[in-house]
Image: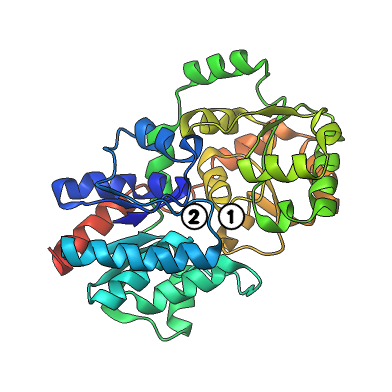
């Protein structure tokens, strides 16, 4: 099991537990800040990884290159029955390349996602991992169709839903705890916006980041912004402290806290792929600040895709009749399955490799 980021930890937790002692975890350290890594392992009750690398802070090329080298060295010593990777991170690609170079089968969890935007580094990662993999766990029929168009089909592909469903259900605090969180943050139910920003397309250009922060600051509701380290560094470097002042800037949150506040927010604003999935389980509307998306299923009912200059307008458009919208969204099933993805993946692993 090769992972290195917060989303990978969350989405592979059920698979790790299902495999029990058969799971050996290699953490690449791609997310090296404890607020983005260890806190999630602790919150999910997972043991510390058996092997820890230190790839955080390196360039994409260095993370993939050094990750491939170091993971390959570990695999030759571990001799696994198969190597499991998740999603589209540099860690996932490094794990897949390492397994390919050492002759071990590759299992790709969350296979088949496509944005068809080659300006997105993650698109390159996910395509390469899919074409290297021996077992592909696709979350939706759309993902299965994407793979089939590229000649990847047959028994090596399973459509099992997304492990995010069981992860959210596992971590979501009950209504009483959510009420406590609101009190701790001084918030009212459905009376605030929860925002996250971390993608390079939004943080690396000061003009883009400044526009998004200004748009958020113009909203009529309080905006809670857990500040990602990349975004914090970019804002400091560009002297944007004044644009942060109207926002309720807080430290990065553990998964339980974030989901608790997300479930009670009026609207979410984010550039995260994971949040696109989570809102379909929580029944909340989302403004996605990105050029493109690999998760079109979320946009049928729950999300809208906008550029930086449309953040405020798109968020405000959700606010009239927000209680009724929340009720309608909550009644819809998530397009990402019924919460059985992890058990289906474990079952397929045991049949094929164990």
Tell whether 227 sits left or right of 240.
left
Picture quadrant where residue 79 is located: bottom left
Q: Residue at x 39, y 57 (%)?
A: 161
Say which label, 1 or 2, has the lower sequence index.
Answer: 1
Q: Is residue 11 visible?
A: yes
Q: Residue at x 24, y 46 (%)?
A: 50
Mark linked to residue 335: 2
Q: Is residue 88 visible?
A: no
Dots 1, 2 in contact, CB < 8 A: yes
Pick the front one: 295 or 6? 6
> For mark 1, what is the residue?
298
Q: Is residue 224 above or below residue 165?
A: above
Rendered location of residue 199, percent (x, y): 65, 54
Picture quadrant where residue 108 is located: bottom left
Q: Where the N terminus falls, by quadrant?
A: bottom left
Farthest residue, direction bottom = 151
């Amino acid at each position: 099991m090769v992972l290195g980021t917060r989303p990978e930890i969350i989405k592979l937790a059920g698979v790790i537990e299902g495999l029990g002692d058969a799971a050996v975890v290699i953490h690449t350290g791609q997310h090296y800040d404890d607020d983005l890594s260890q806190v999630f392992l602790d919150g999910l009750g997972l043991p510390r990884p058996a092997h820890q690398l230190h790839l955080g802070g390196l360039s994409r090329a260095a993370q993939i290159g050094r990750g491939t080298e170091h993971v390959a060295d570990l695999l030759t010593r571990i001799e696994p029955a198969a190597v499991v990777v998740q999603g589209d991170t540099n860690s996932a690609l490094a794990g897949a390349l390492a397994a390919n170079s050492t002759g071990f089968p590759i299992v790709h969890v969350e296979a088949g996602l496509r944005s068809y935007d080659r300006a997105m580094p993650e698109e390159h990662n996910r395509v390469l991992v899919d074409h290297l993999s021996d077992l592909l766990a696709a979350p939706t029929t759309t993902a299965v169709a994407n793979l089939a168009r590229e000649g990847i089909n047959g028994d090596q592909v399973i459509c099992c839903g997304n492990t995010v469903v069981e992860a959210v259900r596992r971590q979501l605090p009950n209504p009483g705890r959510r009420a406590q969180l609101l009190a701790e943050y001084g918030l009212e139910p459905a009376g605030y916006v929860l925002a996250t920003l971390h993608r390079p397309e939004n943080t690396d250009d000061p003009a883009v980041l400044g526009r998004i922060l200004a748009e958020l600051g113009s909203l009529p509701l309080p905006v809670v912004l857990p500040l990602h380290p990349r975004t914090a560094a970019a804002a400091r470097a560009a002297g944007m402290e004044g644009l942060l002042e109207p926002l309720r800037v807080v430290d990065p949150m553990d998964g339980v806290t974030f989901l608790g506040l997300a479930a009670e927010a009026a609207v979410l604003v984010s550039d995260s792929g994971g949040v696109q999935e989570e809102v379909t389980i929580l029944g909340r509307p989302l403004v996605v600040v990105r050029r493109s998306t690999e998760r079109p299923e979320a946009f049928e009912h729950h999300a809208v895709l906008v550029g930086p200059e449309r953040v405020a307008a798109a968020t405000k458009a959700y606010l009239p009749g927000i209680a009724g919208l929340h009720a309608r969204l909550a009644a819809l099933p998530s397009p990402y399955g019924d919460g059985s993805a992890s058990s289906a993946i474990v079952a397929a692993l045991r049949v094929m490799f164990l």
